[in-house]
Image: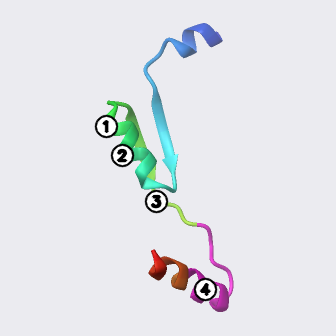
Amino acid sequence: MSLTSLLGQPLRVVNVGLELFARELEADSVVVVHVDWRPPSGSPSVAALLARLDDAS
């Protein structure tokens, strides 16, 4: 498939992480598959710090 023919196709997106991006694309009638992915937190102390950040928002 050439680049020209590829760019002439409808946009289809795999969105990883931020659901807001997927919703915005869907609002523009883009076909989106959203993957609810989060990076591993590592140790329990790192997980606790991340949880505090999440609580602050």
Q: Write down the residue under mark 2.
A: 23
Alpha carbons under labels 1 and 3: distance apart: 19 Å
Look at 66% across and 85% down and name the residue there.
46
Alpha carbons under labels 3 and 2: distance apart: 13 Å
Q: Write down the residue under mark 1.
A: 27
The magenta stretch spans residue 47? yes
Alpha carbons under labels 2 and 1: distance apart: 6 Å
- The mark tally for this picture is 4
Alpha carbons under labels 4 and 3: distance apart: 20 Å
Q: Earlier in the sequence, mark 2 or mark 4?
A: 2
Q: Earlier in the sequence, mark 1 or mark 3?
A: 1
Q: What x and y, as percent, mark residue 44?
A: 63, 90
Above or below 14: residue 35: below
Q: Write down the residue under mark 4.
A: 49
Q: Write down the residue under mark 3.
A: 36
Q: Earlier in the sequence, mark 1 or mark 4?
A: 1
Q: Earlier in the sequence, mark 4 or mark 3?
A: 3
What secondary structure is found at the residue carrying circle 1? Answer: helix
Q: State yes or no: discs 1 and 4 in contact (Cβ < 8 Å).
A: no
